[in-house]
Image (tube, rainbow, N blue to C red):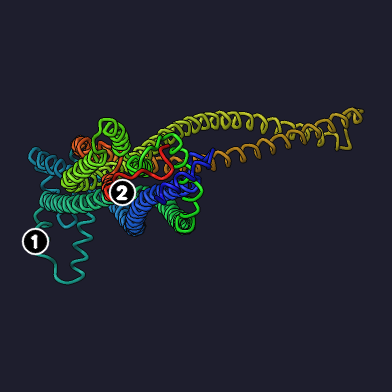
Amino acid sequence: MMRFVILTSLLCIAGASQVNPVEKVLEMLSGLQAKIIKEGEDAQKVYAEFSEWCEDQSKDLQFSIKTAKAEVESLTATIEQAKANIGAADQQIDELSNSISTDEADLKAATEIRTKENADFAAEEADLVDTVDTLERAIAIIEREMAKNPALLQAESQNSGNLVAALKALVEASAINSQDASKLTALVQSSQNSDDGDEDMGAPDPAAYKNQSGGIVDVLSGLLDEANGQLAAARKTENNNQHNFELLELELKDAIKFGNKELAKTKKRKAEAGETQASAEGDLAVTTKGLNEDVAQLGDLHHDCMTKAQDFEISTKSRGEELKALAGAKKIIAEATGGASSQTYDLAQTAMSFLQTRLSTRADLANFEAVKYVQKLARSLGSASLAQLANRMGVATRFSAAAGEDPFEKVKGLISGMIERLVKEGEEEASHKAYCDKEMSETETKKADLTAGVDKLTAKIDRQTAESKKLKEEVAVLAKELADLAKSQAEMDKLRAEEKAAYVANKAEMEQGLEGIKLALKILRDYYAKEDKGHESADGAAGGIIGMLEVVESDFSKGLAQMTSEEETAAAEYEQTSKENAIAKVTKEQDVKYKTKEHASLDKATAEDSSDRDGLNTELDAVNEYYDSLKEQCIAKAEPYAERKKRREAEIAGLKEALTILEGEAVLLQRTAGHKLRGGQM
C-alpha cells in the first residue's frame, strides 16, 4: 500500500533528466583511470625496450672498448718490437759495413802487393831467361869454335888461370858478339868475385876450383846451371805467391760477397720493420681514435640512459599520484553521493515511466514493480537479455490479465527460466573460460617472447645495417678522398717539376746576366779610373752608363734573390704538403682497411641475425594463427569473462529479487481477495 502511494506521488514530478550526471562523472573518472593506466603500461613497455637497448648498446660498446684496448696494446708492442728490430738492424748494418770496408781494404792491399810481386818476378824471370839464353848460346858457340880451331883450346889452357882473359881471347877468336861477350864477362867476373869471397872466408871450394881448372866451358856450364836453378826457384816462389794470393782473394771476396748479402738482408729487414712500424702506428692512430669515440659514446649512453630512467621514475611516480587522486575522488563520489543521486535522478525516471503505464489493480502494481525493477536492472547492467525479459514480462502481464490467467505464475515462470538459463550459461562459460585462460595465457607468453625476440633482432639488424651503410659510405668517401689526394699530389708533383725547371733555367740566365753586368762595370770602372788616358775620354757619359749599369745590377741581384727565395718557399711548401699528404694517405688507407673489415663483419652478423629472425617469424606466424583461432573461440564477444560473470551474477540476484517481490505481492493478494482497492479503479 505504501509503495503504491509513493509511486502515485511521483506523478507530480515532471521533466526529469534522462541521464544521471553522477554516474556520468564516475564513468568519466573510470575512463580517465583506464587511460592513465594504459599510458603507464605503454610507457613501461617503451622504457623496457629502451632499457634493453641501453643494456645491449652498453655491452656492445664495452666489448668494442675491450677489443680496442687489446688491439692498442698489441699495436704498441708491435711498434716497440719494430723499433727494437730497427735498432738491431742499424747496429748490424754498421758492423757489416765496417767488416766489408776492412775486407775491401785488405783485398786492395793484397792486390797491390801481388801486383808488385808479379812485376818483380817478371823482371827477374826476364833477366834470368836472358842469362840462360846467353849462356846456352855462348857454350854452343865456344864448343863449336873449339872443335874447328884447336888453337883456341891452347889459348884456353894458357889462360886457364885467368878466366876473364881466356874468355876475351875466345871472344876475339869466335863469333860471339860484343853484347853477349859483355854479359858473359860480367857473369864470369861475378862468379869469380863470388868465389873469391868464398876463398876469403876459408879454403876454396873443390868444385869451383875444378870448374875453373876444367876450362871456360865448364865455368859457363856451371853458370848456366846456377841460372836455371835461380829461374826455377823464382818461378816456384811466384807460383806459391800466386796460389796464396788467389786463396786470400777468394776468401776476401767470399767474405765481401757474404757481407754484402747479409747487409742487403739486414737493410731489407730494417725496411720491413719500418713499414711494420708505420703501418702499426697508422692502425694505432685509427684504433685510438675509435677507442676514444667509443669511450665518449659509452659515457653519453650512460648519461642518456640514467636521464631516461630518472624521467621514467618521475613520470611513474606522478602517474601513480594522479591515479591515487582519481581513485580517492571516485571513492568519495561513490560513497557520499549514492543517496542524493538516487533521490535526485532515479525517482524522477521512475515517475516518468509510471506516467506511461496504466495501473488498474494491486496485481498490476506488483507486476509493474517487478517489470520496472527488471528494466532498471537491465539498464544498470546494460543487459539486452534482461531488457527483453522485461518486455516479455510486461506482455505476459497484460495478456494473462486479459485472458483471466494468473499473471504472477506467468511472470515467475519467465524469471525462473531466465535464472536457470543464466546459471547454465555461467557453468558452461566457466569451464570454457578455464581452458581459454590457460591456452591464451601460454600462447600470449610465447607470442610475447617471440615478438620480443623478433623486435630485438629487428632493432639489432636495423642498427647493424645502418652502421654498415654508414661505414660503406665513409669508405666510399675515403676512397674518393684518396683518389683526389693522389690526383692532387700528381698535379702538385708536375707543377713542382715545372717550377723547378723554370727556376733552374731562369736562375742560370739571371746569374749569367749579373756576372756580365759586373764584368762590364769592372771594365768601365777600371778604365775610367785611370788618370793617364791617351785621349779626352767621355767621363760624363760613362758615368751615366755606369750608373745605369749599377741600377741594372741592383735589379738583377734583387730579382735573383727574390727568385731564390720564392723557389725555397715553394720547395718548402711542396715538401710540407707532400709529407702531410703522405700521412693523410696512410691514415685514410688504414681507416678504409678498418672500416671495410668492420662493415664486412656487420654484414655477416646481419645475415646471421636475419636468418635467426626469419626462423622466429615463421614460429611467430604459427603462434599468431593459433592465437587468432583462440580469440575466435574465447574472446569473440566484446565483453570480458569477468564482467560477463559479474553481470550474470547481478542479473541472477536481480531476478531473484524480482521473484521475491512477486511472491510477497502474491501472498498479500490472497489475504485481501474479494476486496477492492480503496479509492476505486483508476
Residue lying farthest bottom?
202
- Badge 1 is on which residue? 207
Kind of residue at disc 1: Ala
- Image coordinates of residue 478 in percent, x first then y, are 43, 36
Q: Who's the residue at 23% across and 55% down the image?
A: 189
Query: Nearer the viewer's eye, disc 1 or disc 2?
Result: 2
Q: Which residue occupies 9% across, 37% down?
A: 148
**Regarding mark 2 in the picture, which secondary structure is present there?**
loop
Q: What residue type is labelled 2?
A: Thr
**Label 1: few (<14), some (14–19) or many (≥20) C-alpha neighbours in 10 Å:** few
User: Is 273 situated above or below 496?
Assistant: below
Q: Report, in whole angstroms, how far the alpha carbon at label 1 lies from the one at label 2.
A: 201 Å
Which image quadrant is residue 544 in?
top right
Q: Farthest residue to the front: give it.
A: 674
Residue 538 makes an appearance in the image: yes
Q: Which of marks 1 and 2 is nearer the N terminus?
A: 1
Q: Which residue is drawn at 61% across and 32% down?
A: 503
Judging depth in this view, the residue of 392 and 530 nearest the camera is 392
Question: As displayed, is residue 292 above or below residue 507?
Answer: below
Is disc 1 placed on a helix, strand or loop? Answer: helix
Residue drawn at x 39%, y 50% is 1
Quarter holding the C terminus is top left
- Residue denoted by label 2: 672
Q: How crowded is mark 2: few (under 14 residues within 10 Å), some or many (20 or more)?
A: few
Residue 605 position within the rendered picture, expressed as x and y whole percent measured from the top left: 27, 42
